[in-house]
Image (cartoon, helix red, strand yellow):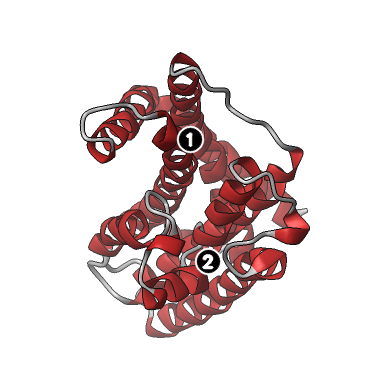
Amino acid sequence: MTFIRGFAAEVRKGLLDLLAGWREVLMEMITFPLFYLLIVLFMGRGQLRADLLLPVLLGMVALTFIHEQVNRVFWSYLGDIQSGVLEQTCLTPLPPAASILGRQVSAVIAALPTALAVLATGAVAVTVQGGELPVDAQMIVPLAAIALGTCGLALILCGLTLVFKRIEIITQLSVAVYAIAGGTLVPLAAMPDQIAFLSRLVVPVAPGIEAMRDILLGGHSLAALPTGWGLGWLLAQPLLITAAGVVLFNRFEHLARHRGTLGRH
């Protein structure tokens, strides 16, 4: 019951923060879709080319989601550290897993409005260009893989901030890495083999984006994905990243408790 109450309280706190910052959310729901259209215009040399709208849309939705989800978890956790709330929480019977899991769930929910705004903008743009946004139930699998993998990444970043100070820049640099080398805007098949290998290995959104493009653009099934490392890796990669996140977070938290530095930053 302690775990359930703590988990529910963290989810509720995250959703209240979302409602309190509705102006920020509204601004992001405007700027991210505009950013998507500008990228397509840039790649299309000033034209909203139909052959670019859908491929870039799939990558941009994933990029928006990972940016919003990871940053919301990281900054909320950092805020608790700086205000001393985290140190007080760790003195209570509340299991740390309840706190961090609740943050993850609320961050996933909070990331949806902006990601859906990008998706809606892309759907309108594709329709205006005479196309149609395809729908396939198989998309649930890569979308779930992206959500789970980004949660694992957020765990790693939250663990790092418990021990290493002033690492905020990492979250910003990571978004640039995902955008440039994560297959979000340019397919990994068009990149050097070494970069494609590393992206498929460690970038949480890379296998999911490749799978979505194979399903929606190529008409392939989950069992026969032609690009990337197939269905097995699509399922295994987010699980491995999340497992690594749990292990590293627990390790860093134990180290911070031992040093007595939970409230220092």
Q: Residue at x 78, y 53 (%)?
A: 1
Q: Residue at x 71, y 36 (%)?
A: 136
Looking at the image, can residue 184 be seen?
Answer: yes
Quadrant, the C terminus? bottom left
- Depth check: give the residue in front, 228 or 181: 228
Residue at the spot of label 1 = 54
Q: Is residue 38 left or right of residue 56?
A: left
Q: Which residue is drawn at the image coordinates 58% and 37% (left, top)? A: 12
User: Residue placed farthest to the top in the image?
Assistant: 128
Q: Secondary structure at mark 1?
A: helix
The percent coordinates of residue 108 (x first, y second) are 55, 44
Which residue is the site of mark 2? 91
Q: CA distance from mark 1 to mark 2?
A: 49 Å
Residue sitting at x 54%, y 71%: 245
Left or right: residue 139 compared with residue 46: right
Residue 95 seen from this side: no
